[in-house]
Image (tube, helix red, strand yellow):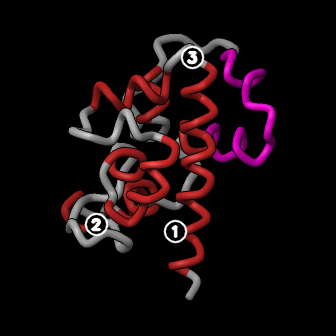
Amino acid sequence: MSDNKKLSLYKSVKNTFVYDDYLDVLNVIKFRYCFVNFRIGSHALGVELELYKNTPPENKLCICSTLNCMEHELHIPLVCDNYSVIRSSYLKYYYEYPTVFKKRLIMSSDNPNIFNSVATYLYYAFQKRNSQLNT
């Protein structure tokens, strides 16, 4: 995989391009779809949307957060205060002291329970985000 900025999360959690077990474990289609799209960077986060506009990283702030942080793949599942209630329901063991290691753990785990929790969390977080942005 090249040095291209596309697929940056995917490349950070995968070393090889092979079929993943989570595709069989995530039985709820809407959760699987959300997880796959998040993992490959097919989402509407600031870090991805601004990639093509050559916007400096400091201008890719999360518009749903009060933390004045960059909106990226670590911010949404582990940091953003806008999703703290949803996070406490689905990712309660991972959101304290967020780190890149925890991001890698939740995005590349072999544990079906983690896959389901992360996928469910992402689905509901993006539902909330989209409803806030569309109002």
Say which residue label 2 marks. Answer: 61
Alpha carbons under labels 1 and 3: distance apart:
27 Å
Quick one: label 1, few (<14), some, or many (20+) residues within 10 Å?
some
Q: Residue at x 52, y 79 (%)?
A: 133
Mark 1 or mark 3, which is nearer to you?
A: 3
Say which residue label 1 marks. Answer: 129
Q: Earlier in the sequence, mark 3 or mark 2?
A: 2
Q: Earlier in the sequence, mark 1 or mark 2?
A: 2
Q: Earlier in the sequence, mark 1 or mark 3?
A: 3
What kind of element bears circle 2? loop
Say whether residue 129 is left or right of residue 62.
right
Q: Residue at x 43, y 34 (%)?
A: 9
Alpha carbons under labels 1 and 2: distance apart:
14 Å
Where residue 33 sits: x, y (%)? 72, 43
Quick one: label 2, few (<14), some, or many (20+) residues within 10 Å?
some
What kind of element bears circle 1? helix
User: Looking at the image, which is closer to me, 46 or 52?
Assistant: 46
Where residue 47 sits: x, y (%)? 37, 55
Alpha carbons under labels 3 and 2: distance apart:
32 Å
Mark 1 or mark 2, which is nearer to you?
A: 1
| Residue bounds of the magenta highlight | 20-36
Residue type for callout 2: Leu
Say whether residue 28 is left or right of residue 84.
right
User: Looking at the image, which is closer to me, 83 or 54?
Assistant: 83
Q: How many marks?
A: 3
Tag 3 near tag 2, CB within 8 Å: no
Q: Main secondary structure of the magenta part?
A: helix
Q: Residue at x 56, y 60 (%)?
A: 126
Say which residue label 3 marks. Answer: 111
